[in-house]
Image: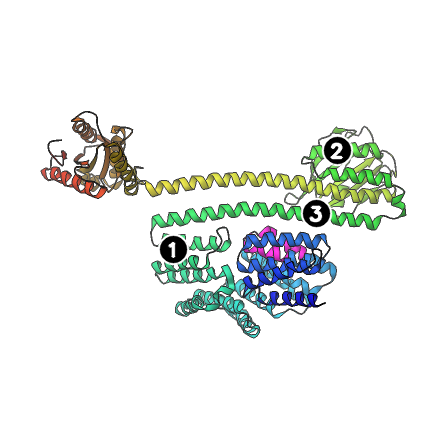
Amino acid sequence: MEAQVQIEQWLSACWDIMISEPAKAITLANQVIDNSEPQSEFRSSGLYYRGLSYMYQGDFNRAFDELTDALHHAHEHHFDLNTSRINNALGMVHQSNGRYGPALDHFELTSEFARESGNTPALVPPLSNMAQVFFDMGDLESASDQLREIDELNTKISDDNLVEIDLLRARIQLGYLNFQEAEAYLAKAIALAHSINYASFKLRCQEVLGRLRRLQGRLDEAESIFKALIEDSDIYSVGSDAIYIYIELSKLLISKGQIDDAIEIVEDGITFVKPLKRSPQNIKALGQLAYAYEMAEDTHNHAKALSLLVSAMKHSSKRQGQSFLDVRRIKRQQVKDQFQKKLLDQENQALKRAQNRLEFLNDIAHQLASTLNFVELGQRLFDIFSRKVDTHFLSLVTTDYELQSLKFQFVIDQNELVESENIPFNTPGSNMVKAALTRKVVVINDARKEKVVNLIGNHAVSPRTMLFFPLVQENEVIGVFSIQSPIPSAFSEEEIHLLEAVTTFISIAVSNIQSHETVKQLNKILHQEKQEIETAQQRIEHMAYHDSLTSLPNRESLDIFINGQIEKARFERRNFHLVYIDLDGFKPVNDQFGHRVGDQVLIVISRRIQKALRSLDFAARVGGDEFVLIIDSFDKKGAVKGFLERLLGVIQEPISVDQHNLTVSASIGAARFPEQGSDLDRLMHSADQAMYAIKRLGTGGFQFVENHQ
């Protein structure tokens, strides 16, 4: 008894501090887990609390793994309340990572449990969370509708949930730029946050207030609010969401023209908060940083920020695809469990008389979930039913709500596949449509007497009994399965109930096939995204190390290359030359014919220089009309001179641009490693001096640093 009291005290303390002190809460949860029986509800609660604590600590991946284990434990031991609460927590984890589809799935599961159990107050958290997800997705109207549904519950709402709801209402009104309404809701949230004295709520209220003041143009007041929040010792209580304070302050500083300060504050926020690479917080912070660098016209850092942003978004897409599959797996298991319960409830004396048939169909139905192809599914079903019941015809349609029609996936008449056109929802007299829209089984005991129209198939055998079963998965009609017999009233009521139960497995099989197609499409999209990202990364890397006009390497590439060349020359005891080229007569070309023609001249000269080089040589553009070459050592004495004569010749060849025949020359200086310099700066200085000696003569040409070369 004392042990139970101690565990209850640990759980209570863990719940109270998990937001403000998640590390201590994890320690308490571990004590609960270590001191509880493996199959007890205490252990289930300890696993749940530990997963929540990791979420509040900002470790969303660990939280996802912990809560998934907790969900399996609660589900296995039928702790229904914990199952519902853990689903809600998993939704919060997915939401925090920007995986909105899986988040909504978990919140819906939580709300469904609350409705089925008649626990109206328990509906508030998942509905509020769904509203927040819609807001994060930018769907303000759906978020507002979700909050109105909470109002219609007419139930008592806890103060902490009220703070969340009023804060969200304030944010929604800010989205519509309704400042007066936003301020009213915010005032209510602030008052409640102070009354319950939750540090995280108070900070979040101040963040929204600062954003309101910024949007109102009251920049100095907003700046004071954000700076006070950054200096607040309780900023840790909001976890990774603290980055939004830095982002808002950065936006404000850009509005005031303080671009450098805006960059610095985002960088400080990333350093302080350390958001996870794939998290929405990190993605938004990198987006703001890239925008600030763009405003500062800092091309290099803008490209780096964009590269980090693309990488974070890529990993986020992969994680979201995996989470989608995890959610579908858990929900399919829950459907199977619900079906087993339904079978047990229906196992009365009438079904026992048909036990052999039930066991056979149940075993086969379980096998259907493994097929990933509609035609294969149809053939398996026909083999099952044609041997055990009087049927000659099977068909299956799936719903296409976008096209408002039913799409045939297979029609099998007397073991032959038959083509058939889709059925629009507005087709009169269609029993397929009726079953889909009413979600009820449609039974025709004699098609001839009831004068059924819209028959499909080859009509070699006329159908008399016709059954149409809606296929429901995740509370949505995903299709209709039909079985027909040439015998009137071929199926008893008990058999129809049995077939209805078996269609649950057909629904799972259809869902599996559709999920498989979704995954294939997702993999295709991910492959395309990967190619786009790799192309963007290559483009960013090329921009960082190459001149945008001529595509020659730039000064940064020159620095990298020369360091390797010096190391190689020293190791092999060889020399090389650094050649500095400055075009003569280029400025008059720009002045007379314009920069577009001048750019074309530079492109032509660049290509000529590249063509004149050997495979081991290197060329870079280091200025407007200035180029630097690294010429590897020649075997024969005086060969460098011959090379420079040829280079000067190709530069001086006439250039035709826009029907203008132009000629430019060049002043060239050459310095040899290591005699005229042991590093890039000294070599550049030496070659530059030699080049200017030629340029002062005004005739063009080349000169070495030492005349004996």
Q: Secondary structure at mark 3?
A: helix
Kindly report the distance in space between the C-alpha atoms of the residues bearing marks 3 and 2.
Answer: 22 Å
Kindly report the distance in space between the C-alpha atoms of the residues bearing marks 1 and 2.
Answer: 60 Å
Asked if residue 106 is among those painted magenta in the image, a careful observer would answer: yes
Q: Report the magenta residues as a range.
A: 87-110
Q: Which x, y percent locates residue 326?
A: 62, 47
Q: Quadrant of residue 406?
A: top right
- Between discs 1 and 2, the one toward the N terminus: 1
Q: Quadrant of residue 493?
A: top right
- Quarter of the image with the N terminus is bottom right
| Of residues 229 and 3, the one drawn nearer to the viewer in this rendering | 3
- In this rendering, the answer to whether 13 lies above or below 323 is below
Q: Which x, y percent locates residue 472?
A: 72, 46
Report the label total. Answer: 3
| Amino acid tagged 2 | Arg
Residue at image coords 18%, 26% = 639
Disc 2 residue crowd, few under 14, some 14–19, many 20+, Cα 10 Å = some
- Between discs 3 and 2, the one toward the N terminus: 3
Q: Which mark is residue 380?
A: 2
Disc 1 residue crowd, few under 14, some 14–19, many 20+, Cα 10 Å = many
- Between discs 3 and 1, the one toward the N terminus: 1
* Residue position marked by numbered label 3 in the rendering: 333
Disc 3 residue crowd, few under 14, some 14–19, many 20+, Cα 10 Å = few
Residue at image coords 36%, 54% = 295
Asked if residue 214 is among those painted magenta in the image, a careful observer would answer: no
Kindly report the distance in space between the C-alpha atoms of the residues bearing marks 3 and 1.
Answer: 48 Å
Q: Secondary structure at mark 1?
A: helix
Q: Is residue 659 visible?
A: no
| Amino acid tagged 3 | Gln
Q: Secondary structure at mark 2?
A: helix
Q: Which mark is residue 292?
A: 1
Name the front one of labels 3 and 1.
Answer: 3
